[in-house]
């Protein structure tokens, strides 16, 4: 009888070890850093498609497009300043006399005033183009931040789910040991407490996931019914060299384009201010019908060159010229300041990317090692050489390692996209890499 019980105990231990190790091996799979994120298995979308949808939908883009149309109209208006200007005067005197004057002025030389207006209008158009790109950049940056939250929450859900399945396997094993009288109820209570904690963590992760999903739907203006795919995304295939990224950013960043256009506007305004002290020469044609001064004048037609000069009150023209000069210098200094800020941000994002890339293999190896330790502790626990608390703590460590990899995955993917965005490698209108 004693021998039979011993055989049953041996069989029970063998069964428990095999059962748990089978579950652990099923969970210890290679972690694909670019696996899709989301619940749907029916369809997938790439981040480039989300960016394109946001570009077409988001209100700030529409506002910037309207601003660009206004700037184009201003360019057209500046062009017409080179054409003749018609004017009509009509007057009536106290003695019943009436007079009318029809005039046509064609500018011949203005000292650069008309050129300054034209250059300012074209610079404002370039600024409006840059502001449109800047709006698209801002929307894209916001969307990428939400994608990072979405990917991290998705990874946390999967990590907590794996951890819960592992604890449930331990619970099944412990239940059989309690029934066999070889484990205590306090061990089961400890495990149930850990399960309650992981359930709470899972609910929190699911809440963050739903929040990120809702934010993506607001940004794109459409429901997110597909998972987000990264494996075939060309935006993640770029090689990142800091020197090249910096050069590309400084030559393409829309914010810098906006500041460059502002410098051009200030220079055009300075040119117009300098031209105020110059006279205007025009060809004038007049046709006069009657006059309020004398009787008997029916009509008269004149064609002549006219010179006008109006430098402004006192020495205001000189003061305005000085002010315009400093506005140009101010705009140039603001550009240099913004360049330094953007380079600083690029350094931070590049450091995040390199750090995540360097830690990827280490964390994956840590997961494998901690899983092996858990398997070993399970065998040692059943053999009576490890405490139950050691086993539960090691299971939690495996889950924490998966959570670390989920965070790293989100940072690696998001920083890759941000670097592509800063380097001007994203084509907003055509959903993806340039």
Image: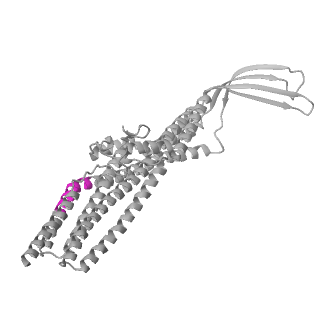
31 displayed left or right of 115:
left
Q: Provide residue 336's location: percent of width, then percent of height.
A: 40, 49
Q: Provide residue 99's location: percent of width, then percent of height.
A: 84, 27
Q: Provide residue 305's location: percent of width, then percent of height.
A: 67, 23
Q: Provide residue 161's location: percent of width, then percent of height.
A: 31, 61
187 displayed left or right of 307:
left
Where, quadrant-wise, is the N terminus in this rendering? bottom left
Residue at the (36%, 41%) spot, across then down? 425
Pick the residue in front: 208 or 75: 208
- Above or below: residue 301 compared with residue 183: above
Q: Any magenta on residue 151?
A: no
Q: Any magenta on residue 366?
A: yes
138 displayed left or right of 82:
left
Pick the residue in front: 359 or 39: 39
Q: Residue furthest front?
A: 1
Residue at the (44%, 51%) spot, across then down? 216
331 displayed left or right of 73:
left
Q: Is residue 373 visible?
A: no
Where, quadrant-wise, is the C terminus in this rendering? top left
Residue at the (40%, 54%) spot, across then down? 145
Magenta residues (range): 354-371
Total tally of numbered discs in the picture: 0
Q: Quadrant of residue 115?
A: top right
- Above or below: residue 126 compared with residue 360: above
């Amino acid at each position: 009888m004693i021998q039979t019980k011993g055989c049953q105990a041996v069989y029970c231990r063998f069964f428990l070890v095999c059962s748990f190790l089978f579950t652990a091996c099923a969970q210890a799979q290679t972690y694909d850093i670019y696996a899709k994120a989301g619940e749907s298995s029916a369809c997938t979308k790439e981040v480039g498609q989300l960016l394109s949808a946001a570009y077409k939908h988001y209100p700030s883009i529409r506002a910037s497009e309207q601003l660009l149309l206004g700037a184009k109209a201003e360019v057209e208006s500046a062009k017409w300043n080179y054409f003749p200007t018609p004017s009509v005067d009509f007057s009536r005197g106290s003695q019943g006399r009436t007079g009318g004057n029809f005039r046509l002025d064609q500018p011949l030389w203005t000292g650069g005033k008309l050129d300054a207006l034209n250059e300012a209008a074209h610079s404002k158009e370039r600024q409006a183009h840059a502001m449109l790109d800047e709006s698209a950049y801002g929307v894209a940056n916001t969307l990428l931040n939400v994608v990072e939250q979405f990917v991290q929450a998705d990874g946390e859900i999967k990590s907590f789910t794996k951890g819960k399945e592992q604890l449930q396997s331990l619970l099944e094993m412990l239940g059989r040991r309690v029934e066999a009288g070889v484990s205590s109820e306090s061990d089961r209570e400890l495990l149930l407490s850990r399960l309650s904690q992981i359930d709470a963590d899972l609910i929190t992760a699911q809440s963050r996931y739903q929040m990120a999903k809702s934010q993506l739907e607001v940004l794109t203006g459409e429901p997110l019914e597909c998972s987000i795919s990264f494996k075939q995304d060309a935006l993640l295939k770029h090689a990142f060299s800091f020197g090249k990224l910096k050069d590309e950013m400084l030559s393409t960043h829309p914010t810098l384009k906006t500041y460059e256009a502002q410098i051009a506007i200030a220079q055009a305004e300075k040119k117009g201010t300098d031209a105020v002290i110059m006279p205007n020469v025009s060809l004038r044609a007049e046709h006069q019908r009657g006059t309020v001064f004398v009787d008997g004048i029916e009509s008269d037609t004149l064609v002549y060159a006219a010179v006008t000069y109006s430098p402004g009150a006192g020495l205001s023209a000189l003061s305005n010229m000085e002010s315009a000069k400093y506005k140009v210098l101010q705009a140039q200094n603001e550009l240099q300041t913004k360049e330094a800020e953007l380079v600083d941000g690029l350094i931070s994002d590049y450091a995040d990317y390199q750090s995540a890339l360097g830690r990827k293999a280490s964390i994956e190896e840590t997961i494998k090692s901690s899983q092996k330790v858990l398997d070993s502790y399970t065998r040692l626990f059943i053999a009576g050489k490890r405490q139950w608390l050691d086993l539960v703590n090691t299971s939690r460590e495996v889950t924490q390692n998966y959570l670390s990899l989920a965070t790293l995955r989100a940072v690696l993917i998001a920083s890759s996209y941000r670097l592509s965005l800063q380097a001007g490698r994203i084509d907003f209108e055509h959903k993806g890499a340039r």
